[in-house]
Image (tube, grey):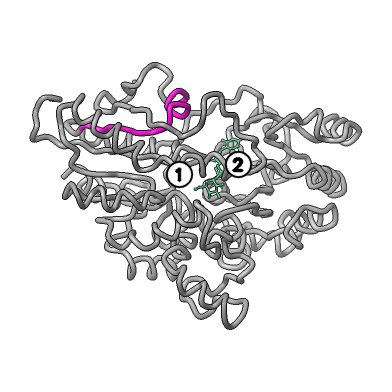
């Protein structure tokens, strides 16, 4: 019960931006369901909690989970411009860890139990100290790709190579397929707040009791081996999105529309939750889709009618295209009609494309996306990057043809099919992610 001081109390600190909260919350709900006597206090911004817990701060699905609002640092009425995705993050970083500390104390008082474990977004370097002060385990959750995690652990070596010998990382095991141009600018930047946070994270992660990853064993054995040698414990419990898969919610009728299309013919276009490509790139994509005569489904952030040239939109949507504000992506990528995914290469999107067995055309924008796009092309060989790094009509059409047609397209589909099997196998009852999840529950609540 909540008055028993001897019981366990896990504090969860989320990073309330992009696709960080949803995967962590679904993981925490699973742990909470597996350990009903343990209390979970879930700390996130008010804005994020309002969408995740619309019925109040006690979770409807997990009675042992309560959400708490932490201050996001923003002045009253602040609206992010959307042009610089890092801006609200920098505002938030000015007020950590004080915003978490104060609400943590309040939660301990309210629930009558000191915390016994700190489960946090891996970004939060300060949680290492907080956990140590309290003599509780720190369990960070890494929501991006394993190769990006490795780059943060290897930042000092990468900076040295950058400063001296040139432009490839073949000296760093696990990153040898990466070129310096694929490296996140955050790894090279030594001063801005977001990169500084990532650098400090890389320094303290080796202290963590275990690092949880949204990944599955054998996805990239060399990277995995390197991570294991640098961290106390790595627990791959992904893909998170499969445990359990989200229910289908299809208010814009994507699935019935796909049902009408030929197998492996449709190009699905989406750039995740934060990115909006510039207008000239949007136009280039539409023209390339027209040129390759590909039917397409586009999850469009923004005002499609105002931003896509009207003649293009009409000729496209009139015949072969469908533009929606949001698509049930996992289900779309799992549909037999989808033949290619034009993506910013965010980690969740890459995993979902693997799960659907769909080849990718990558156009990375920021953060780990460039490394992910490179790994898709050069390590797994399950897609191609848009030549030149930005959408042009020509480069996009070439990339689409490479993945959709011919021998190369066929081999790409075979390889992504093999990864799909591996991902699905990992979350089966005897799979490695299931086993690792049990170990995680033990560490967090044991
Ligand atoms: C940040 O990623 P993003 O949120 O921009 O992109 P993804 O990691 O690809 O996640 C997007 C999620 O939103 C879902 C989609 C993914 O689970 O299925 N979605 C959807 O359901 N319907 C839509 O119409 C559009 C999207 C960051 F930008 C990346 O670099 C990081 O890799 C990532 C993880 O840390 O976070």
State the image quarter where residue 71 is shown: top left
Task: Give the residue at x 33% y 27%.
Answer: 67
Judge depth for marks 2 and 1 and give the one in front.
Answer: 1
Residue 68 pos. (x, y %): 33, 28
Residue 308 pos. (x, y %): 82, 35
Q: CA distance from mark 2 to mark 1?
A: 23 Å
**Residue 381: mark in rendering:** none
Task: Give the residue at x 49% y 60%.
Answer: 148
**SS at circle 2:** loop
Q: Is residue 52 magenta?
A: no
Between 77 and 428, the one lying in front of the other is 77
**Residue 272: mark in rendering:** 2
| Residue range of the region highlighted in magenta in the rendering | 39-51
State the image quarter where residue 370 is shown: bottom right
Q: Is residue 48 magenta?
A: yes
Q: Quick check: is the Cβ at mark 2 less than 8 Å away from ligand 1? A: yes
Task: Give the residue at x 37% y 17%.
Answer: 56
């Amino acid at each position: 019960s909540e008055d028993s001081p001897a019981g366990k109390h896990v504090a969860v600190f989320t990073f309330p931006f992009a696709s960080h909260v949803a995967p962590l919350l679904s993981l925490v709900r699973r742990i909470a369901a597996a350990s009903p006597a343990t209390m979970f206090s879930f700390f996130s911004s008010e804005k994020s909690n309002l969408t995740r817990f619309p019925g109040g701060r006690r979770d409807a699905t997990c009675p042992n989970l309560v959400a708490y609002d932490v201050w996001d640092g923003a002045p009253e009425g602040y609206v992010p411009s959307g042009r610089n995705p890092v801006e609200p993050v920098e505002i938030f970083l000015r007020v950590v860890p004080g915003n978490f500390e104060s609400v943590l104390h309040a939660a301990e008082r309210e629930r009558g139990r000191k915390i016994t474990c700190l489960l946090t977004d891996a970004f939060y370097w300060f949680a290492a100290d907080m956990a140590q002060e309290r003599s509780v385990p720190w369990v960070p959750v890494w929501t991006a790709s394993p190769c990006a995690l490795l780059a943060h652990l290897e930042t000092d070596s990468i900076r040295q190579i950058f400063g001296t010998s040139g432009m490839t990382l073949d000296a760093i095991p696990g990153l040898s397929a990466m070129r310096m141009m694929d490296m996140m600018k955050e790894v090279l930047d030594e001063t801005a707040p977001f990169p500084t946070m990532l650098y400090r994270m890389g320094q303290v992660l080796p202290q963590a009791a275990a690092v949880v990853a949204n990944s599955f064993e054998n996805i990239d054995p060399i990277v995995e081996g390197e991570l294991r040698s640098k961290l106390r414990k790595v627990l791959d419990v992904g893909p998170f999105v499969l445990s359990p898969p989200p229910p289908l919610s299809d208010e814009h009728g994507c699935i019935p529309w796909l049902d009408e299309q030929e197998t492996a013919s449709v190009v699905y276009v989406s750039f995740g939750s934060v990115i909006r490509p510039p207008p000239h790139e949007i136009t280039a994509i539409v023209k390339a889709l027209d040129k390759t005569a590909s039917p397409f489904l586009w999850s469009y952030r923004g005002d499609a009618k105002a931003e896509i040239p009207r003649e293009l939109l009409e000729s496209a949507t009139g015949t072969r295209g469908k533009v929606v504000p949001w698509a049930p992506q996992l289900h779309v990528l799992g549909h037999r009609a989808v033949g290619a995914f034009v993506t910013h290469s965010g980690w969740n999107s890459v995993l979902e494309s693997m799960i659907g067995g769909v080849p990718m055309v990558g156009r990375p924008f920021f953060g780990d996306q460039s490394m992910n796009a490179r790994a898709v092309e050069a390590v797994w060989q399950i897609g191609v990057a848009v030549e030149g790094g930005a959408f042009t009509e020509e480069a996009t059409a070439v990339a689409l043809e490479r993945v959709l047609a011919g021998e190369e397209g066929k081999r790409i589909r075979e390889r992504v099919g093999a990864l799909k099997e591996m991902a699905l196998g990992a979350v089966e009852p005897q799979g490695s992610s299931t086993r690792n999840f049990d170990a995680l529950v033990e560490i967090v609540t044991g």
